[in-house]
Image: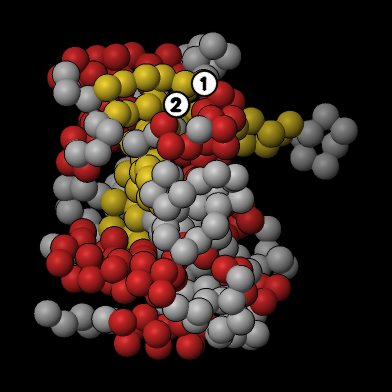
Amino acid sequence: FEFEFDEFPWGSDYYKANGSMMPSDALDTLSTYDAIFLGAVGHPDIQDHITLNGLLLPIRRRFDQYVCERPSILYPGIESPLSGKSPFDIDMVVIRENTEGEYANVGGFQYMDFPEEVGIQTGVFTRKGCERVIRYSFELARRRNKKKHLTSITKSNAQGYGMVVWDRAFDRIAPEYPDIKTDSLLIDAAAMDFIRRPEAFDVVVGSNLFGDILTDIGAIITGSMGLASSANLDPDKRYPSMFEPVHGSAPDIMGKGIANPMAQVLTGAMMLRHLGEGSAAEEVEKAVQNLLTESEILTPDLGGTSSTDSVGTAIVNAL
């Protein structure tokens, strides 16, 4: 098979030059593609809410990418900051609801620049939105065929409306999957358990905010943000899905040639699998794992001294 890539220079530099993160017709342009392969965005001179609301969130919403899938795996050759963890002790996937919840972009300001300034941020939890991402997570737990265990993340003790809708959806769907073990954790307890006992998790499903927090924890406990891949999926494939690494743009190391490319490469493997090229995806993942296990060609975040280009070349050679 072959790929045809079209590259668009959208992001922080585009914002500096044009006052927007992407052109007004960008979403129409992207709608014609099979997938979107995104590099990290962000710049210290531009507030984060601009980069998020000007690029990532509009793409996720327009193309109904309601699943954000983020694996968290401790690979051989990588040392976790948690003591006593062996390869694959940490092997989970966090599924994050990706189009509504706390990031629904519902709210507003009043009395700006006055002492009474108010910001109102509303979370939106629909039955449809909760059910479809929870059902996807049950199917994934079955398909992975590992622990066959799904954990729901909630905070319904304090958020007595939206999270109750979430809990009710989970309780409604769970009986349809008698082969999948289930439990439900409050977000604060889940964050602690990601540190204390990450090996207990298999598939985890949470809201937009809770999933966002937990996936960053999941990335760092496996050794480096430079290994964390991510997919924003429309599972029904009506629209293009978007594939991006978990890490940010790291402007502090720009131009030094030391950024770890593995997260972007592993994200590419997720894209291959989504496009029906599962065998190719496995080969890419094996190439990265072989490099981590058998090679000293690693970037500084993994304790090596190699450049971005040399790691990329080594992955190609491993393939």
Q: Amino acid at mark 2?
A: Ile
Q: Residue at x 79, y 34 (%)?
A: 117
Q: Residue at x 17, y 53 (%)?
A: 238
> In the displayed structure, does residue 166 sit left or right of residue 108?
left
Q: Residues within 10 Å of mark 1 (few under 14, many from 20)?
A: some
Residues 216 and 144: in front is 144
Secondary structure found at label 2: strand
Q: Earlier in the sequence, mark 1 or mark 2?
A: 2
Q: Amino acid at mark 1?
A: Leu
Work out how far the residue at label 1 is from the one at label 2, CA to CA, in angstroms.
Answer: 6 Å
Image vertical order of residue 234 relative to residue 183, above or below:
below
Residue contact between numbered discs 1 and 2, judged by CB atoms under 8 Å: yes
Secondary structure found at label 1: strand
Q: Is residue 33 visible?
A: no
Find disc 2 in the rendering and name its residue: 153
Find disc 1 in the rendering and name its residue: 186
Residues 19 and 6: in front is 6
Residue sitting at the far right: 115
